[in-house]
Image (cartoon, rainbow, N blue to C red):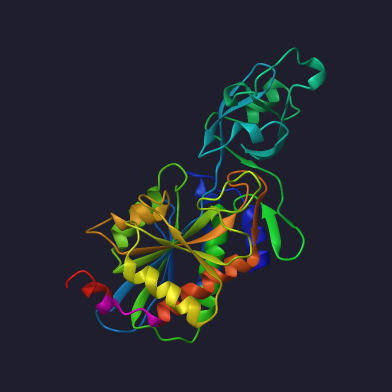
Amino acid sequence: MKKKLMTLSALGGISGFEFSVTEHIKKLLVPYCDEVEADPMGNVIGIVRSGRKNAGRVMLEAHIDVIGLMVSGISEEGFVSVVPIGGVDSAVMPGAEVIVCGTEELYGVVGAKPPHLQTGRETAARMEDMVIDLGLSGEAVRKKVSVGDMVYFAEKPVALSGKVLSGRGFDDRAGLISLLICLEKLKGTALPFDLYILAAVQEEPGLRGAAMGAERLAPDCAFVVDVCHGDTPDAGRESIFKLGSGAVVSFGPNIHPYLSHLATEVAEEHKIAYSPDADGGDTGTDAWAVQVAAEGIPVLLLSIPLRYMHTTVETLHFGDVKAVGEILCETLKKLDLEVLRCTFQN
């Protein structure tokens, strides 16, 4: 599973361009599912049939898109200007290595003005002032690159000490790995409901794929996996979680209480590390889009602590990825859809 995460991290597939990773995602789900398909927008959906007539539906969801850039212009000299796709911080741009997906994949760098040429107190460069240098003439670039082409960051993932990994796109491809861990552990288990796996597109620009998928599938309940903020010296204390501390289980109006309490119950029963998180409103994740889809869907959000979110060195502890998968697995085994339906009726 670590190797699968590292492979996913190195792929493109920024928001709106997930088609470049669709086949890879489908291959990851095929060993666990009775059916795997992609919808017109690029969501990948896997189905594990229970074999029961009129079976209930339970959905597991993680988003597969990552932040990136898109070509917005090409100068006479061949420098490529870009706009951000998702929450790209301009502070991480200078010196970044990128791949421009034109008629072929082209390696480029985002240059930065050397300190020797700076005068006085210069402010940090703005996104609109930065360009990608492909090392080609303007004519050569225009033959290979067009406005609207995808650009993704090229830095490769690395293993740090112990079980700590660093790379780009762990938000939220680590979440997809947690789903695979769950499915692996569920092999041979007969669940009383059909299980739908939604690998959703376009979370970063607005929770779009999850909204489409949840509306279409209309599950009886859903489990969403995403990342949350890991501990760093400058991160403060509120909703910050230590790497290696396990899964983060959310509570609040975006979350169904039966599901959150069931998840913590099984975590304690099976001695799986976790931390509770109080989310007072919209969690800012696909859990929000799923909850308000169709006629309303009971949802649980499980999160993986992650440092340096939306950079090329997102850092996590693989034990936390595993803990989320294990809690998912044990929760599904104890999930009672009839109890869920009656929660608010008394």
**Residue found farthest to the front:** 237
Percent of width and height locating residue 178: 54, 67
238 or 303: nearer the viewer = 238
**Which residue is farthest right?**
116
Is most of the magenta stretch helix, strand or loop?
helix
The residue segment tinted magenta is: 334-339
Residue shown at 40% from the left, 43% from the top:
206
Query: Residue 61: x and y, percent?
Result: 43, 62
Q: Position of residue 153 (x, y in %)?
A: 65, 42
Residue 74 coordinates in the image, percent (x, y): 61, 22
**Residue 58 visible in the current orientation:** no
- Judged left or right of residue 244, residue 274 is left
Q: Is residue 38 magenta?
A: no
Q: Is residue 335 covered in magenta?
A: yes
Name which residue lies at 66% across and 45% down: 312
Residue 122 seen in the figure = yes
